[in-house]
Amino acid sequence: MAEVVGVDIGGTKTHLALAYDDDDALLRQAVVPTSSWRDVGTSAAALRELIVTQLGEAATTRPLAVGAHGCDSTAQCRALEAALRAQLAGPVTVVNDAELMPPALDVEAAIGIAVGTGSIAVARDAAGELLTAGGWGWLLGDEGSSAGIVREATRAVLADLDRGRPPDALTRRLLASFDASDGPELAMALTRAASAEAWGSHAVEVFAAADDGSAVAARIIREAGTHLASLVGQLRARGVRADAIVAGGAVIEGQPRLRDAFTTALTREHPTIAIHVLDRPPVMGAVALARRIAPSLIPEVTS
């Protein structure tokens, strides 16, 4: 049996997998912090070195599919493909990391939504061009992501403190989580911890506050789910014909409140669309895409 390689480059972690071209069992896999090898952008040389280190030199000759956080246009995907082809011996395909969600579940004609440290919805139009909605980063957007939820929850807490309202469970939990005694210290703590990963690590407190009865936390989560559902409408308004949605990422998979808010809003706006939540690593989508370009699976042309 032939081997294929799949790589999921997320904003926080990178998952590499080596598999046979006709068996879901992974022969070898590794998960490393993305920051440990990736600087600004994605260097093909750095990715090759990572593949060699984690999967072995032979993996550089295998069909490779990469889902890359930050490849947000067709041109960016093609540029990384070309750079990787110059570094590797096997066929290569590159997509946005959220595009791994549908093939991971073997779902066709679907919009992929990634909800983790960041958030984005992606699909291809009839011409094969990549279309995205959201994904503007933790400073400008990424509503529904862990970082976005913490940002909006903090804004709500600071607004309530400015109004002189007594602290509820959300206020108490965020203050404690950021080791702050009041609003100014909380604002300063977020300013000092200025990264998506740092902010996102506190998102569990927002969900816990909702469980504790915080109406503000519950509202933040509902609004996050509504925003994520609106990304689907934005893509469909631009001509994407999708019969299904596949959502994945640590936050949507691990937090039932957000998942329920998302599915409720999506069903209300798009009642006929099928909704799937990923139950396996997105890298399995990369493995599935690598199988599609494996020479052993490409039909021979006969004259």
Image (tube, rainbow, N blue to C red):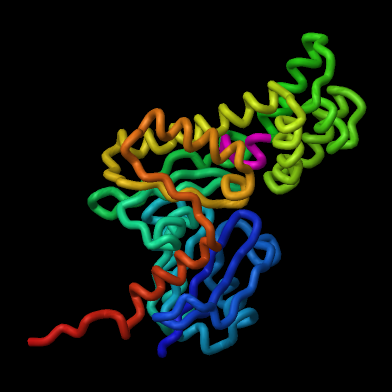
**How many tags in the picture?**
0
Q: Nearer the viewer, residue 2 or 70?
A: 2
Q: Is residue 194 visible?
A: no
- Asked if 63 appears above or below 263 in the picture, the reply is below
Image quarter where the C terminus lies is bottom left
Q: Is residue 131 left or right of residue 142?
A: left
Residue at image x 40%, y 38%?
Answer: 232
Residue at image x 70%, y 48%?
Answer: 197
Q: Is residue 300 left or right of residue 84?
A: left
- Asked if 268 appears above or below 243 in the picture, the reply is above
Question: At which x and y percent is residue 77?
Answer: 42, 59
Q: Is residue 148 left or right of residue 112?
A: right
For the magenta stretch, what is the residue range? 142-149
Question: At which x and y percent is residue 254?
Answer: 63, 48
Residue at the farthest left position: 303
Image quarter where the N terminus lies is bottom left
Question: At which x and y percent is residue 105?
Answer: 43, 60
